[in-house]
Amino acid sequence: MKKAVTLVLCLLCILPSFAQETTTDKNPRNNIRQGFGTHNSFDLGLGFVNPNFRTDGSAYYFENWDTEGVIYTKENGSFKIKNININLYNNTLDALYDENSVYTFDSKNLMKIVVNKKSFRIMEIDGELKIFEQIFRKGFSVYKHYNVLYSEASVNPMHARSSNKYIKKAKYFVYNDGELTNIKLSKKAFSKSFQSDKMSQNSITEYIEKSKLSLKKEDDLIKVLNFITR
């Protein structure tokens, strides 16, 4: 009975997509689901220069689908689910249904996602719903968001692009008082943004320099955030 209820909840808040993968698929959004089916409703009018080029990298957050997590929804509460992944290209949560099918969750009904002990939130920025990974929480929260670029291969040898490729670029945001603000990762701009009555700009800069930390490395960034909030 419990499993049946969980299945009903899943069906209430997800959009099913069933299609067989083909080698001539011209939609880059479909290629992010190689081996897991396609979503025919996505039609960007974009095509490959050569559909036989291989694609390097993935638009998904996790390397494989051996995952389990908890989904927190606005209308149906929370429930556990396995075989889910974060689609970074179009900012959606996908669930693997079988070898050829995936469900794409309606982001409007999602509040929070916890997968393999990593926490994600759906928030609006620039008028669009995006998925952010929480990397720090202590007084304020810091989130990471990936911009995923799709680079097409070229038959022109001068371009040196022999394969299609997904390129992930991370940006960091501080969330405080209901507002998301982009974090600038230069020492001067960062220390100025995070100075307070208890922590001066010079103290932050000196800690970064003496500890030989790079704000562009996530582990180092978290060390600096811990220093600021100690």
Image (cartoon, grey):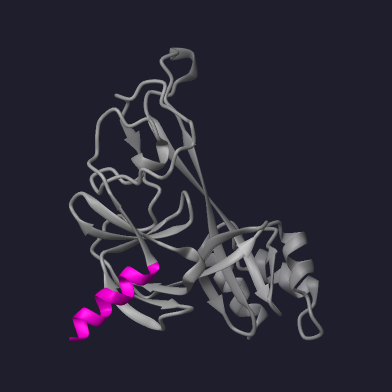
**Residue 77 appears at what percent x and percent y?**
41, 83
Q: Is residue 194 magenta?
A: no
**Residue 83 appears at what percent x and percent y?**
26, 64
Q: Quadrant of the N terminus?
A: bottom left
User: Is residue 203 left or right of 8 when viewed as pictured?
Assistant: right
**Residue 43 appears at what percent x and percent y?**
45, 38
**Residue 121 appears at what percent x and percent y?**
51, 71
User: Is residue 65 left or right of 123 when viewed as pictured?
Assistant: left
Quarter of the rendering containing residue 56: top left
Q: Nearer the viewer, residue 85 or 111?
A: 111
* SS assignment for the magenta stretch, majority: helix
Quarter of the rendering containing residue 196: bottom right
Picture residue at 43% right of the left edge, 20% below the top: 154
Q: Nearer the viewer, residue 173 or 128?
A: 128
User: Is residue 119 left or right of 182 when viewed as pictured?
Assistant: left
Picture residue at 31% right of the left edge, 69% below the top: 11
Q: Over which residues does the magenta segment extend?
A: 1-13
Q: Is residue 12 magenta?
A: yes
Q: Is residue 172 above or below residue 118?
A: above
Q: Quadrant of the C terminus?
A: bottom right
Q: Is residue 193 above or below residue 200?
A: above
Picture residue at 47% right of the left edge, 75% below the top: 112
Q: Nearer the viewer, residue 91 or 108?
A: 108
Query: Number of labelled discs?
Result: 0
Q: Is residue 120 above or below residue 20?
A: below
